[in-house]
């Protein structure tokens, strides 16, 4: 059954626009969409209907009026061809007149298309399997994300059915729904939960009930995780800005504009905010003033979130390096080169930095010298950010496993399969590893054995890192929700 559509009845849920060089990948996406029961336009399935039609008019109708979303598979071949250019122009005309999202870019390379701004969120086909892309499209259709241009925010709070009794471990206490995907990990401070959303807002809700305290709009989706320090919330946005908001009222204290979208989550230490940007820089910003103190240039996007330890900032970059930068001067101390982009955020423990890479490895690096200590190969990319507890490091992999490794040697202690392409980062509290998964669940595993203690059904992919305070854990979901779960 197709997903119900808002406001209009379109002929298709999705139309696919691609060059023939990417047909093998798109064919697999189309099969997965068909299995999901979605209505989609895929030219290879339309040979009979296209026969004899006046193609320019017909394709303009398809790509401008016939679908709720248009997926554009961006590549050098796509930009160079006549018919794909025609399709893109029709889709772009619709996007310019539609206040809601219409164009959904999927990139095979970094080719620029006219009218497609570099700040628009995209899926990277180089690291996203066709089945995963189809799952994301199903989530997008379920969400039917409201326009970021609406004047009034939307927050729906739903108490758990267990509110008349004490909830059991793994049971949802409350859930709130926003108007966009939540990939920003919640942060808890002073009885308030702070998080960003794809609805272009930063939210503050009561930790006990989920009731809204305030929300504030930015100019783009907020995938960055807020950091709270000195009653100030620091967070990045897809609109290229890093913001500082009053933690109690949401009033903006300052903003600083970088050269590209900010996916990185800020770290606030000793009066300085450190944050990465997709303009290839790591920034140091005065926490009180919002003035730039220094910026450090890498050779790639800095989506990794910085960690500060003993006067050194550690951060990953798409240039395949883990960098160590002097926190005061912004000069490089060392770099450690991996075989893939580094979007995993590092963890520092007892003079060792742990970080994952898209080359499938988790690395342990000497914090002072940058020398490699050991590496462990998983079965997929390591976008998950490691967590260290005692002498064990925990990390997820795109192979669907959570790994527990000896922190000193890298020897595997156990692994547990909890999904298909695990990307979320674990949290370890009181002998329990908490982890969100693409299997629509929040897992609690014994930190020593990996045995399942409980699992909470979330109804959506969970990419956020769980945050725990007291007997409650909070996570966000790609259905636009944040939920509080009893631990």
Image (cartoon, helix red, strand yellow):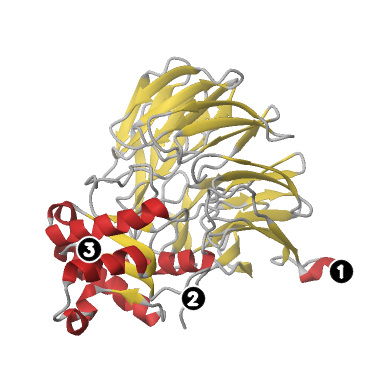
Q: Residues within 10 Å of mark 2 (few under 14, many from 20)?
A: some
Judged from the image, the secondary structure of the residue bearing numbered disc 1 is helix
Given residues 24 and 317, the one toward you in this image is 24
Residue 463 versus residue 332 in the image, above or below = below
The x and y percentages for residue 269 are 58, 25
Residue 207 is marked as none
From the image, tell me which residue sits under label 2.
Answer: 3
Whole-angstrom CA distance, mark 3 to mark 1, is 53 Å
Judged from the image, the secondary structure of the residue bearing numbered disc 3 is loop
The x and y percentages for residue 473 are 68, 55
Residue 18 is marked as 3
Residue 47 found in image quarter = bottom left
Visible residue check, residue 156: yes
Judge left or right: residue 162 versus residue 381. right
**Circle count:** 3
Whole-angstrom CA distance, mark 1 to mark 2, is 34 Å
Residue 351 versus residue 207 in the image, above or below = above
- Please tell me whether mark 1 or mark 2 is closer to you in this view: 2
Whole-angstrom CA distance, mark 2 to mark 3, is 23 Å
From the image, tell me which residue sits under label 1.
Answer: 164
The x and y percentages for residue 15 are 32, 68
- Tell me which residue sits at (33%, 32%) in the image: 371
Determine contact: label 1, label 2, CB under 8 Å.
no
Q: Residues within 10 Å of mark 3 (few under 14, many from 20)?
A: many
Of the image marks 2 and 3, the number of the one nearer the N terminus: 2
């Amino acid at each position: 059954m197709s997903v119900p559509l808002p406001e209009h009845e379109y002929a298709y849920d999705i139309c696919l626009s691609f060059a023939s060089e990417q047909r093998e990948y798109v064919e697999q996406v189309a099969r997965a969409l068909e299995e999901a029961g979605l209505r989609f336009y895929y030219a290879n399935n339309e040979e009979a209907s296209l026969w004899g039609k006046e193609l320019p008019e017909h394709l303009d109708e398809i790509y401008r009026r016939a679908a709720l979303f248009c997926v554009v598979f961006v590549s050098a071949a796509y930009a160079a061809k006549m018919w794909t250019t025609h399709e893109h122009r029709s889709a772009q005309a619709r996007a310019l007149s539609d206040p809601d999202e219409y164009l959904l870019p999927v990139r095979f390379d970094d080719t620029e298309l006219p009218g497609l701004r570099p700040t628009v969120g995209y899926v990277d086909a180089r690291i996203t399997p066709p089945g995963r892309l189809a799952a994301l499209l199903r989530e997008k259709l379920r969400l039917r994300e409201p326009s970021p241009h609406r004047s009034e925010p939307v927050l729906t709070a739903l108490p758990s059915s267990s509110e008349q009794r004490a909830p059991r471990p793994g049971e949802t206490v409350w859930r709130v729904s926003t108007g966009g995907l939540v990939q920003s990990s919640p942060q808890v401070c002073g009885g308030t939960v702070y998080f960003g959303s794809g609805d272009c807002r930063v939210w503050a809700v009561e930790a006990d009930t989920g009731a809204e305290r305030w929300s504030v709009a930015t100019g783009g989706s907020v995938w960055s995780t807020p950091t709270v320090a000195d009653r100030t919330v620091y967070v990045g946005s897809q609109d290229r800005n890093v913001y500082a908001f009053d933690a109690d009222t949401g009033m903006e204290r300052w903003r600083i504009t970088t050269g590209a979208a900010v996916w990185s989550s800020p770290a606030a230490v000793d009066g300085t905010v450190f944050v990465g940007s997709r303009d290839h820089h790591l920034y140091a910003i005065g926490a009180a003033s919002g003035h730039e103190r220094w910026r450090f240039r890498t050779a790639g996007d800095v989506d990794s979130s910085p960690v500060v330890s003993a006067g050194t900032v550690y951060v990953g970059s798409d240039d395949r390096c883990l960098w160590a930068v002097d926190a005061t001067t912004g000069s490089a101390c060392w770099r450690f080169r991996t075989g893939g982009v580094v979007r995993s955020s590092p963890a520092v423990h007892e003079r060792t930095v742990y970080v994952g890479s898209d080359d499938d490895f988790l690395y342990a690096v000497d914090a002072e010298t940058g020398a490699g200590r050991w590496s462990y190969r998983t079965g997929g990319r390591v976008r998950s950010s490691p967590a260290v507890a005692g002498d064990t490091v925990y990390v997820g992999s795109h192979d669907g496993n959570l790994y527990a490794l000896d922190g000193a040697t890298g020897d595997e202690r156990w692994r547990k399969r909890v999904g298909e392409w695990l990307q979320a980062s674990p949290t370890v509290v009181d002998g329990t590893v908490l982890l969100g998964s693409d299997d629509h669940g929040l897992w609690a595993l014994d930190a020593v054995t990996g045995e399942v203690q409980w699992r909470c059904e979330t109804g959506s992919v969970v990419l956020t890192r769980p945050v725990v305070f007291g007997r409650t854990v909070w996570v966000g979901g790609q259905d636009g929700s944040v939920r509080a779960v009893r631990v």
